[in-house]
Image (cartoon, rainbow, N blue to C red):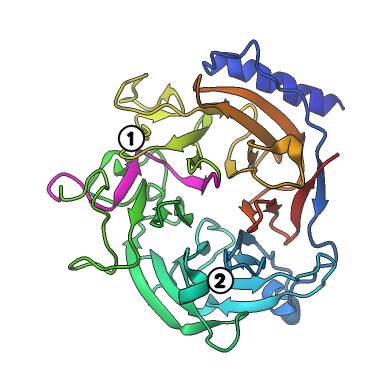
Amino acid sequence: MRRLELSICAIALLLVCSGSTLAAELDTSPLPVKIVSAFPNLVWPDSLTGADQGLNEEVLPIVITGAHDGSNRIFVATQHGTIHVMPKDEQGKSVKLFLDIRKQVIYNPQENEEGFLGLAFHPKYKENGEFFVYYTEKPAGQGQHASILSRFRVSKTDPNRAEPGSEEVILRVPQPYWNHNGGTIGFGPDGYLYVSFGDGGAGNDPHMNGQNLQTLLGTILRIDVDRKDEGLAYGIPADNPFANQEKFARGDIWAYGLRNVWRFSFDRKTGVCWAADVGQNLWEEINLIERGGNYGWNLREGRHPFGPGGVGPQKRLIDPIFDYSHEIGKSITGGCVYRGKQVPQLQGAYLYSDYVAGQIWALWYDFDSKQVVSNRLLRAAGTPVITFGEDDRGEVYFSNRQGEIFTFQAP
């Protein structure tokens, strides 16, 4: 109990320090929502955990999503490079292997920001069977690592199997370092695919990628995967903020000035894109992604000046709606706005966690006053949360490195 009280006090203190104008009224009390195992009897294949070779590797379920095809199936991708169909019955024990591309994915436990990082099903998946993945490729020899965005297709005869030979590479972006790969991909309510890239890695953004509109590093892209522009394997929507400005900026960029978004998601009710950007020295932040928005990295970290060239509030830079210091946690794990029916207490809340601290919060934001009005603690501490995800009905799940998948229940 003492640990929980300290967490709440620290959050309340932080809100005053970080400039929240509703700090005095902000509700930070714990919210008595249950966290339960979504698949309590689940057993992952020995070939995935390395048990068949006498190893004890972590499962690393990195993406949790539905296919939006009416089947209500839940798909889980692992950082190693596999996608699985989860049991229909929550008491089920086994998963079905949907796709295995481990031979072309690089993942090193000591350099753990690479690997298979993103999965998104086409809005018309039921008709066209297309889905998209983002992964770090396994380079030939001493070649440079790169992030790959590819299209795959489901088998024509088995809805629970993909065609591994159907891969079509859409985008390849070289990565100067192993960390800050970003990797979230998702279709917005407009039908376009959004893709997040980290700033390229190392520390401090040494190449100033965050403020460079000629690189895709440090950005969120918005692309049309249903057509191809000249010289590209995709199209650039005409209403992108920098479309047809080749001398000034890449036309596929939607927003920039981001360090390493982990993760972004679209509120299925409002269409707003929420993004959690992992901090470096002192601050973790939550942003609402806007067309053409510059979120300040590496001039700022959260609302705060960063480095020798750091700047304070400026009209050209978009403030996060919320940030918290490394006294609270040191690596934000972004989640989803809850729109399910099982837990009315969470309706409209943005659920997120901190990878280092293990805490889970529910944050409410008022769009009229443009202020956070509540940030309720759901879990004081626990195993690191590596990702959140939604099923087709809007229920939210999260996972840890060991392969456990959890969901929320009303008290």
Looking at the picture, tell me which residue is in the foreground, 115 or 232. 232
Whole-number angstrom distance, CA of label 2 to CA of label 1: 32 Å
Q: Residue 29: which quarter of the image?
A: top right
- Which residue is found at the position 29% from the left and 26% from the top? 316
Q: From what the image shows, is residue 199 above or below residue 328?
A: below
Using the image, tell me which numbered label, if any, was put on residue 193. Answer: none
The spot of residue 280 in percent (x, y) is: 49, 36
* Amino acid type at image mark 1: Asn
Please tell me whether mark 1 sits on a helix, a strand or a loop: loop
Mark 2 or 1: the one toward you:
1
Disc nearer the start of the sequence (2/1): 2
In the image, residue 74 lies at what x, y percent? Answer: 66, 65
Q: Which quarter shows the N terminus?
A: top right
Residue of label 1: 294
Please name the amino acid that badge 2 sits on: Gly
Look at the image and give the residue range highlighted in magenta.
246-268
Q: Residue at 69% x, 57% y: name it.
A: 401
* Label 2 sits on residue: 81
